[in-house]
Image: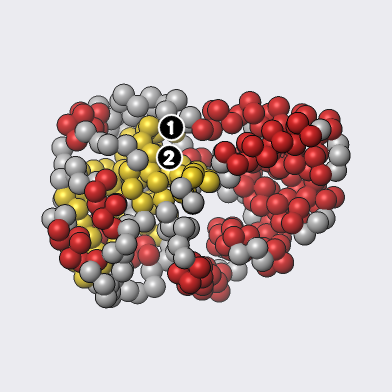
Amino acid sequence: MKVSACLMVKNESETLPRCLESIKWVDEIIIVDTGSTDNTIEIAKSYKAKVYEHPWENDFSKHRNQSIGYATGDWILIIDADEEIEEKIDPKEFKSRLKMVHLTISALVVTVSEVSDKRKTTSWLGMRFFRRASGIHYKNAVHNKAIFGGGCAATDIHFIHYGYSLDPVKMAAKRKRTETLLKERLAMDETDFIAMYYLVQLYIGEKDYDKAEEYGLKFFNSVSILPTDFQYLGVMYFYTGWIYLHKRDGSKAYAWTKKGLEFFPDDLDLNYQMARIGWESMNEELLKTHSDKYFKFLPKIRNRGRALDSETFINAVNPDDWFNRTVYTVDISAEIAMRKYLEAA
């Protein structure tokens, strides 16, 4: 049983050592470098990584697929230079667990938490371990998606992501690059609602609520599938309510959040948002109802990785339901704010 870690990098000398230190237990580290001018390659080689140089082609999936192509392991670990595995992995114990994974399972889910100012702010679930024999590959130039054959199972493994903790100049460059690639996707397909979703996410991050509103409404005009079939729909109702909260349009914020809760009554973010709307509109019943639900669901979300079967990874889940669903109000600051609303009320 052999595990290969695959990365694509460019000028990652500041973050790469932390990442490689957390995965040095794997059998091989494959790195595709897309044009580093710092000492990224030297750092990689100091961890005995196999480094392959490819010029950057504005396509994250292409370079990620190149790294997978060089791997020889039975299982592929996908990780970025601005990430690390939180737990200390015992390779012997971990591989014994991998051997118990049912042959119908080809991917394993981890919990990813964003860290900013030394605290976790958001978290999501993502598939990061794949059987190489599943045909694992990625599509989309930006915000790429894993394609593979087989089922998916959950683990108790936690990744830490530092990608949104960059200095303002680097953060602006990263957002501009992402915006350009997403708009290129929309130019090729004006009904690409996933690209719209990511543009809304990007503009909210920039506090450009007018553009976020524009693409949010385009999104809802483009989606033609059932809510239960689409992993991004719940968070889009949350985003749209969030946009109108910040545009000081309480009636629209309420309407969009209420619609989302009709489809996703157990959604942590939507219940938090409706409780906040109750607070801002001095509707004590609304605040109490949805704050109760928020605190009911919060422990489940915080412990979702640890609550799952970590002995054998055989508890199957639907990849489309679990992949890349960010939860914003799991942050401790959101919990503190909610308690303050209740105390004041």
Residue at 21% x, 33% y is 90
Where is mark 1, residue-wise?
305
Q: Is residue 151 above or below residue 40?
A: above
Residue at 20% x, 56% y is 30
Please say if the residues under marks 1 and 2 sit with CB atoms less than 8 Å apart: yes
Q: Please identify the quadrant where the N terminus is shown.
A: top left
Q: Is residue 245 visible?
A: yes
Residue 174 is situated, as x and y percent measured from the top left of the image, at 46, 68
Where is mark 2, residue-wise?
111
Q: Is residue 167 left or right of residue 246?
A: left
Residue 40 is situated, as x and y percent measured from the top left of the image, at 24, 66
Q: Is residue 23 left or right of residue 45?
A: right
Colour mapping: secondary structure
Mark 1 packing: few (<14 Cα in 10 Å), some, or many (20+)?
many
- Give the quadrant of residue 57: bottom left
Calculate the distance from the C-alpha at mark 1 to the C-alpha at mark 2: 6 Å
Label 2 secondary element: strand
